[in-house]
Image: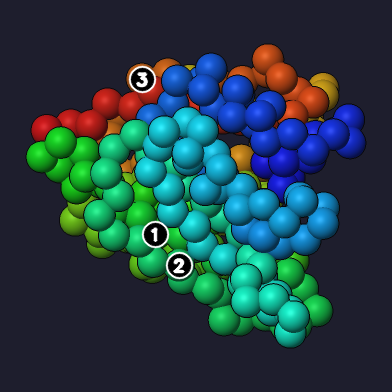
């Protein structure tokens, strides 16, 4: 969501909230979210604002933390999640490999109570650095490969469909765009998109019914939202 600042330069959480609300999505993964981070987002706790406005449950996983000497507030930037269903547990897995030069990345893990079932949802935003990207995909695939519960993992993967990282994920999980027969779902840039950088992968016990790229409000962010309707097998 580019910390709420659209490609027109306007900072508007209301616009982000409207896109989410009109999508009618139940589970929402968000990247590039600020919590009291800086002047660029008016020092707002963006995920709490969105959760309250949309009447949804929330989770947050930081990738950058700034602490000011003159403030008790912890300034954070990272991945976030919204859910219409109860969140029973959450954990942020900060990737420890890398350097202080590149932006850190993480994997946000959320356990969602979906009626009588436990659903595991992961939100991530991977590096543009090829070495770090490979390390991050290896970490993710090893962590969730033998997961006994249904899994959804989504976010900005910064990779191409058919790449080595994409193939690694597809060995055990399903790319919803490919399964739905839509081919590549172009999400970037938001105006005249030419690349798919954002993906939703699901475990084999989840069936993708339909997939769409939401193009109604391209000015809201530099990426377009990717939406999937999923059927969970009993």
Q: Which residue of the protein is positioned furthest toward the right in this rendering?
A: 9
Residue at the disc numbered 2? 92
Q: What is the quadrant of residue 179 in the picture?
A: top left
Residue 213 position in % (x across, y down):
60, 22
Crowd tier of the residue under label 3, counting other residues whose Cα lies within 10 Å: few below 14, some 14–19, many 20 or above: few
Q: Residue at x 30, y 49 (%)?
A: 87
Check contact, mark 2 vs mark 1: CB within 8 A.
yes
Badge 2 marks a residue whose secondary structure is: strand
Q: CA distance from mark 1 to mark 3?
A: 24 Å
Residue 175 in view in this figure: no
Q: Which mark is residue 209?
A: 3
Q: CA distance from mark 2 to mark 3?
A: 29 Å
Q: Quadrant of the C terminus?
A: top left
Q: Would residue 90 be found to the left or right of residue 177 on screen?
A: left
Q: Which mark is residue 109?
A: 1
Residue 42 position in % (x across, y down):
77, 51
Q: Which mark is residue 217?
A: none
Residue 104 position in % (x across, y down):
67, 71
Q: In the rendered image of this protein, does residue 142 appear above or below residue 169? A: below
Q: Residue at x 74, y 34 (%)?
A: 12
Badge 1 marks a residue whose secondary structure is: strand
Q: Nearer the viewer, mark 2 or mark 3?
A: 2
Residue 216 in view in this figure: yes
Crowd tier of the residue under label 2, counting other residues whose Cα lies within 10 Å: few below 14, some 14–19, many 20 or above: some
Q: What is the quadrant of residue 67 in the picture?
A: bottom right
Badge 3 marks a residue whose secondary structure is: strand
First in sequence, mark 2 or 3: give its number. 2
Q: Would residue 96 be found to the left or right of residue 179 on screen?
A: right
């Amino acid at each position: 969501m580019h910390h709420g600042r659209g490609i027109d330069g306007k900072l508007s959480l209301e616009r982000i909230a409207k896109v989410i609300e009109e999508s009618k999505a139940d589970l929402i993964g968000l990247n590039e979210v600020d919590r009291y981070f800086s002047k660029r987002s008016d020092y707002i706790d963006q995920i709490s604002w969105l959760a309250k406005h949309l009447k949804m449950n929330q989770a947050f996983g930081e990738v950058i933390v700034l602490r000011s000497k003159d403030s008790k507030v912890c300034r954070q930037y990272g991945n976030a999640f919204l859910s219409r269903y109860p969140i029973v547990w959450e954990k942020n897995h900060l990737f420890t490999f890398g350097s202080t030069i590149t932006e850190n990345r993480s994997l946000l893990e959320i356990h969602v109570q979906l009626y009588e079932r436990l659903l595991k949802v992961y939100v991530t935003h991977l590096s543009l650095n090829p070495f770090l990207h490979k390390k991050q995909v290896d970490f993710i695939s090893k962590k969730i490969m033998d997961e006994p519960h249904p899994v959804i993992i989504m976010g900005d993967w910064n990779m191409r469909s058919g790449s080595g990282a994409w193939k690694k994920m597809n060995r055990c999980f399903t790319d919803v765009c490919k399964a739905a027969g839509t081919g590549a779902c172009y999400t970037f840039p938001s105006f005249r998109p030419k690349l798919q950088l954002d993906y939703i992968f699901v475990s084999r016990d989840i069936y993708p019914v339909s997939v769409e790229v939401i193009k109604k409000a391209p000015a809201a962010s530099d990426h377009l939202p990717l939406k999937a309707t999923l059927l969970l097998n009993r």
